[in-house]
Image (tube, coloured by chain):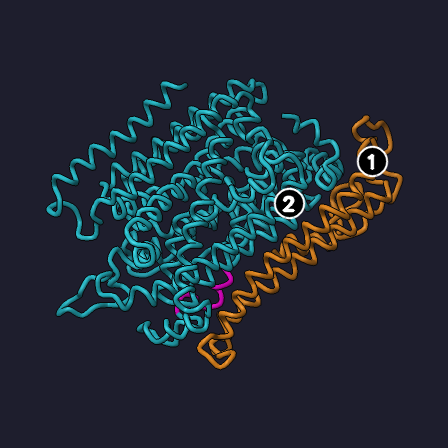
Chain colours: A orange, B cyan
Amino acid sequence: MQGPGKAGHVAPDQHSTPQWGLWVARTPRRNGGQNQGSRTMAEEAHLRVLNNPRFQELVRRRSGFAWTLSVIMLAIYFGFILLVAFAKPLLAMKVGGGVTSLGIVLGLVVIVVAFLLTGLYVRRANGEFDALTARLREEVQ
Amino acid sequence: MRRFLWVSALAALAGTAAHVGLAHAAGALEGQVDRQALNLAAIIMFFLFVLGTLGITYRAAMQTRSAADFYAAGGGITGFQNGLAIAGDYMSAASFLGISGLVFASGFDGLIYSIGFLVGWPVILFLIAERLRNLGKFTFADVASFRLEPTSIRILSATGTLVVVAFYLIAQMVGAGKLIELLFGLQYLYAVVIVGILMIVYVAFGGMKATTWVQIIKACLLLAGASFMAFMVMLRYGFSPEAMFADAVRIHPRADAIMAPGALVSDPVSAISLGLALMFGTAGLPHILMRFFTVSDAQAARKSVFYATGFIAYFYILTFIIGFGAITFLMTDDSFYHAGAEGVINRVGGLIGGTNMAAIHLANAVGGSLFLGFISAVAFATILAVVAGLTLAGASAVSHDLYAEVIARGRANEQKEVRISKITAVVIGIVAIVLGYVFENQNVAFMVGLAFAVAASCNFPVLLMSVFWKGTTTRGSLIGGFLGLLSAVVMVVLSKAVWVQTLGFPEAIFPYDNPALFSMTIAFVGIWLFSKADSSAQARSEQAAFDAQYVRSETGIGAASAHIH
């Protein structure tokens, strides 16, 4: 994950002559003036979308949300795996005075949280983000 | 078409019927010790499943005309149905029997696998599902070749797909043969042939529509059966998990150790490597990725992951309860065990049929022989459904990626492409039967792990980098992807599971159980490095084409025309 995650935040590729590096998790900003010369219709169409503030808003909000949730999920999961690898006695600790161990409780929590996170994302994406996309579509088409 | 369906149904029936007679005649004299007595209830219920699904296949075949019908069920599957089908693809017999068996043998350790298999799903949803839906048509190669050079990218992704499908399929076929031999009292070869014929029929005639419905029906049956078992276990303990755990600790030979991490994860590197393979392998499994094209839009694609995650999470909680239930119900009952030397019973390894049979024996313990028959039939159906999904993914890679793009150079017509796909499905089925037969007595447990490792180290990096990193070029993806694929396979071959346990060398050359940590790194670094170093004109135009891809992957604008089915 580190690979692409990092690539998402670091910046632009040096060898390609243009332009605006990576869009993920950043506000896309057109630093005008490239792509001079003849443009095809299709190019015009996607440039219109790229320059639309609503598009930039959509991407900023959604990417931020999606990467945040991904990082949370990764942290929880690999946190759990690292506890399994390094802190076995901690996970063996009893909770609630019976035989149930902390490890079992945490494991079930990870399962439930994974499901809740997907619910959280779908709710916002199917509501807020799709509404933004729909308005963007109307504007550019 | 109708005649073909009948012929294959009859062949399957005849195969079983012949053997039913044989087994009756031969009785207790033949076969291994572990083979179960012929279970008539199981066979009847399995026939009902086969008849029902063949009926569905027939209807699907009547409605399947275009390529979109064949590969993507015409985009007419709802989010909820697709969620069930994804869960069906994922809840294989291996995860049902394997994980409950692992919990039975070592308690907590079973959870580590369940969690690893589950947590890939949220990440697929957040980062991949929607973009895949917006950019692709039928296979994930459509996405990776959106702006990269299609011929080489499709060769790469078809190779990745076929390697994953092959390993997964061998593991499933061998598992199927063994399981059916055990459950139904059927001979190994018969079992493998029946599975092979049925999967050919589902895929070649019914395409994605039939495969999806087989998957949905099986998912419902499996969830219902597992729910009943978990319910009966919890009923005994007044729905108190603590009471169940306490009883299990009292009974299990490892006592309190079953409540804590044990020997499964020995060193941190293996732990993280396994975690990576489980998590990101899911995001690179071709038969799973294909499922996102069966729904009508991105919204439905998201919903299907939400439902799938819910079903899978619920299922893994059930297998955990079932594993503990098996400890408390079976370990106190000698009739489920082989007695060892001098009548001493090994309460874990001595289970008849091995620990993987824990769930099956529990079905008998909580529901009697009729319910045992039901669970056995469901286990068979589960294998069938999973191999059908794999076959379809493999056939699509050959027809849609290799044939249409590489061989016909994009000039193939739809009818011909679909025909190639059907022929490929038949070939894959036959090859699977042969491989299933050849590998009968080999240790194939490592193959599912290998399939996940390859998916995580070839398919996933290529997909992710092409969508997210503007700098990705064809050359970079090609070199990085193949390096990931190759390193994953080589490291698995040099690891203990193959080098020592299968090939018989004294010591493993690669010290860890799972290669993903290394092979994924090689793939990502490879793609990055060779893209950076690529200063060709082609690379520049591919990078310039990123914006159009970016707009479409984020919004779906421009995608509509590609999806009119």
Identify residue for label 1: A47
| Residue type (three-letter) at the residue carrying disc 1 | Leu
The residue segment tinted magenta is B263-274
Q: Are marks 2 and 1 in contact (CB under 8 Å)?
A: no
Q: Nearer the viewer, residue B297 or B310?
A: B310
User: In terms of secondary structure, where does tag 1 sit?
Assistant: helix
**Residue B171 in view:** no
User: How dense is the environment of label 1, judged by Cα within 10 Å: few (below 14), some, or many (20 and up)?
Assistant: some
Quadrant location, the C terminus of chain A: top right
Q: Please state the chain letter of the residue tagged with numbered disc 2 in the rendered image.
A: B
Identify residue for label 2: B302
Q: Is residue B11 above or below residue B330?
A: above
What label sits on residue B173 in the rendered view?
A: none
Q: How many marks?
A: 2
Percent position (x, y) of residue A8? Answer: 70, 52
* Residue B348 falls in image quadrant: bottom left
Query: How many angstroms separate mark 2 from mark 1 (CA)?
Result: 27 Å
Quadrant location, the N terminus of chain A: bottom right
| Residue type (three-letter) at the residue carrying disc 2 | Arg
